[in-house]
Image (cartoon, grey):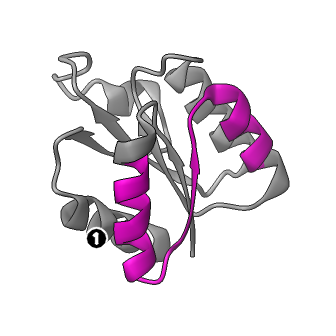
Amino acid sequence: MRALIVENQAELGGLWQRHMQRLGVDADLVLSEADALAALEAADYNVMVLDLVLEKGAALALSDYASYRHPSVKVIFVTNTGFFSDGSIFNHCANACAFVPTGTPPDDLAAMVEHYGTG
């Protein structure tokens, strides 16, 4: 199973990546929308962990592109803001499967990636 992590903070993304790798997930980490687009062109992914508020790019546009390029990819949105706290993200992004705070324990996030990536 392959996962793409799109996270502004390299240290946080790296932490998530290591936890996923411990579960046998082949996880790639990128820091921007442009790098994520390149990764999606180069490989097939089962799951994308996507920071809702990207410093360099637009998360919703990236989610739409992933849905087009890889129709079966599931997106786990992470955020440290109140945007979409009403759950409306699921109305806007057909490939959204989860919406969690950035502070979610890395083991829990890795387990979610494993769950959605094998389903």
Residue nearer the viewer, 29 or 93: 29
Q: Characterize the magenta stretch by its predominant secondary structure.
A: helix
Q: Which residue is mark 1?
A: 111
Q: At label 1, which amino acid type do we have?
A: Ala
> Looking at the image, which residue is at 34% across and 27% down?
89
Determine whether 10 is above or below 25 in the image.
Answer: above
For the N terminus, the quadrant is bottom right
The residues colored magenta run 13-40
Locate residue 108, reporting x and y percent: 20, 64
Locate residue 42, reporting x and y percent: 83, 54
For the C terminus, the quadrant is bottom left
Quarter of the image where one finds residue 63: top right
Per the image, label 1 sits on a secondary structure element best described as helix
Find out whether residue 17 is within the magenta segment.
Answer: yes
Horizontal side of 56 relative to 79 (left or right) equals right
Locate residue 82, reporting x and y percent: 18, 17
Residue nearer the viewer, 61 or 3: 3
Determine whether 81 is above or below 74 in the image.
Answer: above
Bin the neighbour count of mark 1 within 10 Å (Cα to Cα): few under 14, some 14-19, many 20 and up. Answer: some
> Looking at the image, which residue is at 64% across and 28% down?
33
Find out whether residue 89 is within the magenta segment.
Answer: no
Horizontal side of 73 relative to 50 (left or right) equals right
Examine the rendering and report whether any part of residue 67 can be seen. Answer: yes
